[in-house]
Image (spheres, coloured by chain):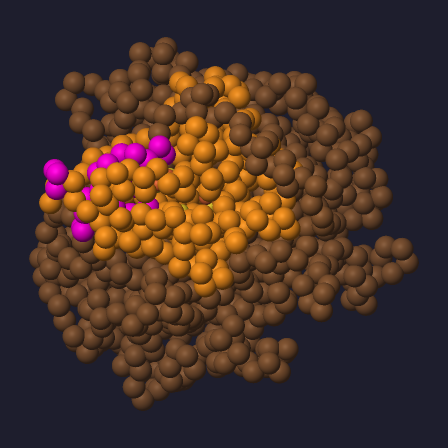
Chain colours: A orange, B brown
Amino acid sequence: MARNVMVVNLERCIGCQACTVACKTENKVGIGRWRTMVRVMEKGRYPNAKRYFFPTLCNQCGNCEKASKRNGGAMFSRRPDGIVAFDQAKAKKDADGVYERAAVEACPVEAISWDKVSGLPDKCDFCAHRVDAGLMPACVQTCIGKARVFGDLDDPNSEVSQLLAKHGVQTAKPKEKCPGVFYLGLDQMFADNLEGFKEITGADVLSGKVKMQQA
Amino acid sequence: MKFNRRNFLKIGAAAGAALAATGKPVSAMELSPGGKSVNKQGVERKKVPYTCMTCNIEDGGIAYVENDRIVKLEGNPKHPGNRGRLCAKGNAGLLHVYDPERVLYPLKRVGKRGEGKWKRISWEEGLNEVAGKIRAHLKSGKPRKEIAFKWGRNRTHGFIDRWMNALGSPTTMNHTSVCESSKKMGMQPTWGPDIETPDFANTKYIINFGSNILEAAYFHNPYAQRIMDGVAGNKAKMVTFDVRLSNTAAKSDEWHPVFPGTDGVVALAMANVIMSEGLYDAQFINDWVNVSADELKAHLAQYTPEMAENYSGVKAEDIVRIAREFATAKPATTYTYRGPCKHLYGSYNERSAMLLPIITGNIERKGGYCLPRGMGWNGVSPSPEHPHEHSKLHQPDNYPLAGHHVSHHIAFQLLKGEEKVAIWMDYYDNPAYTFPSSHVWEKVYQDEKIIPYFVTFSPIISETSQYADIILPDVSYLERNDPENMPSDLLPWISLRQPVIKPLGESMEFRETIRQLALKIDPDGSLNIKKYFDYGSSENYMKMHFDGVAGLKELGGYEWLKKNGVYPDYGDLSPADYKYYKGGKAVEPEYGLHMKEDANGKVTVGGKKRAGFGTPSGKIEVKTDFYGKAGFNPMPVFKAHPWHWSGGKKILKYGQMVLTTFKWNVHTQARTANVKLLTEIVHKNPAWINSKTAAKLGIKDNDLVRITSGVGHMVTRANVTESIHPDVVAVSTACGHTAGGRFAQAMNNAKADAWARDDDPDLKNIWWNDKGVHPNAIIPVCTDPIGGSQGWFDAVVTVEKAKSGDKYGDVVASVEKAVAFYEETLTYNVAGKNHKKMHPELANAPQAEPVKVVSRGDYREFDPVQLA
Ligand code: SF4
Ligand code: SF4
Ligand code: SF4
């Protein structure tokens, strides 16, 4: 069985946001919410300032599925190939009238957002419909730096397997045993501890995201 | 998500270990990188290839269509430039089609000019009115040059010239002087073409002088891919000189913040090091450069690393080290698009930077600095001749080398009455937003005495087109036809832009609008106009371009191109190494074009005549007569800006800085602001100020600040950062629109204008309310007297905390003061009083021969014959 994962090679990411926009047009994601976005951060003193680009997306850890199920929900389900898929038709409202609040808040990487029009939760599903048609996910397809690589970790010859075998890789939230998204170069990027960085794109853009607008 | 070290512990070792001992990297079942798209139900979508036009790079795309609606854009994997990938702007391109503010039928002004009151009219009425005005003018016997046409982006490949030439008017006005013209005029006399194609993917060393190629510029997407292949794949070193830590600087191995306008002297000092230390390529200079190594050494000796340090702030030891690294790390290349040329004397800066790949013999070699490769198509005949009348708006006096004209002077020339206008046509252009001292353009457009009749073809009511008297709306780039080519790869290509869907509403493709106007102006052919527009349809016109192209013809000509989008077919793109494979073999570009044997070649090397370079001598002309004869220094030199320097000393006072502008990766200058998916990523443009400078001035992050130039002032917020030179303040030009739509202007839940629509639910979800503050009004004109470019990065401003009464968004600019700067900049042209002062070294040079300037319609080519 396939195990689909994404490897993001930070050395090759140029922060161009082509992925961010391609994801939105592919998955009809409106403004004010994101399935993926590239956070841009600065650190260091002039003239040794450094800038880092950090693409973020659902890590396919399954926490949302568990939290939803605890609440009697059935919206999220892990596919055999590892993708944490979802079915908006099965979304369940919490007591406060907000769809799947528990699941959304259980996500360690803030990857789920509510559709501003329907109020339904939405997240990256590795473009499951494309993968099923033999196509790369939209963000990988368009990645200018060729930073995002997608494929089957069970196939030792796949590019993702080769990359993981060759390089030290990290995940965004190791404690969650995230099985889906791996980063190359994260250690280097955070070797100096990024606390105290200045965020150029990302923070203000993401801040309003989890606050649900009541219709 | 919180970022701290604890969150980022390694677990990768475990994941990787089990896989480490596997075999060769072959035969994995990988997913397809494109050429097909499915909807959520897995149903395959209709596909139509096109050529992108969200910027000026012309990448290949495939549009996917469902129910006559464009639902997704992807790169065309057959296009060797972008190899299947689109940038953020390209991905968002379909929103230009579905822009809720797009004008979908002709409009006629009913209120005062610029008041925003419009009446819907029929095409018949609109065309009759415009054709009637033009016909009446032609019949009146008044000078034909009073019919004026100004464009900002012209991808019609000669169609606008056809139109204006047929009307008999020389008053075609472009935009190139606010863009790259001085780069072109640095390069063309030196080696022929106006651009280079560096082989980034195969290089070992890149010196980047002020180019933000990973975010914008020629050729952002293709070159970003190749630079990452070179830097991450080929382990090339990249060194960037820039006043600001752009994303390109951030991805470089070294960032050297330079004082604005001094990259040229850094390059000259490096060339000096390379020559004096004997690190140059003697054979290449001997064979291919029109001055000897000794002459070069003697000329460059004045540019010591210490002198360059004094101006640029880059340490002399770094200059020496980087020069040595560059000269020995073969292959190596430079890149400049387009920083060094955007200063007073930018053309000299460009020529100085070119020296480095020349003297190290990195020209036309794998991994080096290569000539652009091009491919063409057939012209459409018959074709009208260029008129013999001369218009100073097309080509002003005393800029003999400005082969790409001086478009940013036009508003000033009109204010001064240098030429008269009867009818003004506006196409894909927004000078009231994108030009220096943009408020002067506003004034000119408002004045019905200066511009009595203003027609726009713009489908967007912008800062400029809002002053139109009539709007005959063009289509979006996904609904039109054009032939395209660009040297964005070493494999040449031509491609097609074609309508992906039928134009929305009543909008009409410009080529068709002009055809109908021409037939109305000259119904019986007696005015000699009709015959140039008798091609039937826009599609027929395309067929005439392409059907006869050799090679393509055999495949099926235009019809084949419609299906494939790009020619030639280089084979299958391998996602592994991003090369094209044909019959199992990788397709490799040709190198050494200048060395090709050519019986007509002017240069003999190795006993054989060679193709050489497109210069009078066939060699690279480091010393150029074009400059010499026009009264400029024929050698690459450095001229310190008199606004910044006096006798080698910096003359900026307390609080004074140089204002520089820049592009974001998600925006063009003006056209992307109403694209919601881009504007939500970048919608505001605070002023970048170095933290030390800010501390001195008592400015804290996010404080309101007032930036004052000699023209006026603006009030914005401070972005206090470590990422900028202490003498520089940077404001992006992407934001701060006063027209153009509700997304552009952060107007959440606002009522639609009468011509606009409410069909996008996101018009109620605009979550940002800061639309930024646009800086162009306060930027003075400052013109390179050689190439005619605007020195965008030269303005001296004072930055201080906002004064009481200052409001965020205030922009106050004086027309009189802007005019004074225009008058000042004229004193630097060849006839001006500052020309001699800036060229003391030419005091004993022979008197410059008078230069004849011929007004020309063709905006692309620099034709030495016309200037000799
Ligand atoms: S990362 Fe978030 S959205 Fe993705 S599976 Fe885990 S909890 Fe769910
Ligand atoms: S895999 Fe698809 S859904 Fe996930 S971030 Fe990429 S484009 Fe978006
Ligand atoms: S498209 Fe690729 S290079 Fe660009 S920001 Fe996204 S991950 Fe980075």
Q: Is residue B58 left or right of residue B605?
A: left
Tell whether position B210 is magenta: no
B148 and A155: which one is in front? A155
Residue B62 appearing in the image: yes
B52 and B351: which one is in front? B52
Tell whether position A114 is magenta: yes
Residue drawn where x is 25% and y is 58% of the image: B99
Q: Is residue B778 left or right of residue A3?
A: left
Residue drawn where x is 72% and y is 65% of the image: B584
Q: Residue furthest bottom?
A: B524
Residue drawn where x is 32% and y is 51% of the image: A86
The image quarter containing residue B292 is: top right
The image quarter containing residue B709 is: top left
Give the position of the C terminus of chain A as an image quadrant: top left
Residue A10 appearing in the image: no
Q: Note whether B564 is above or below B848 in the view shown.
A: below
The image quarter containing residue B230 is: top right
Residue drawn where x is 59% and y is 21% of the image: B314
* Magenta segment: A95-123
- Residue B689 at x, y = what percent? 38, 22
Secondary structure, magenta segment, majority class = loop
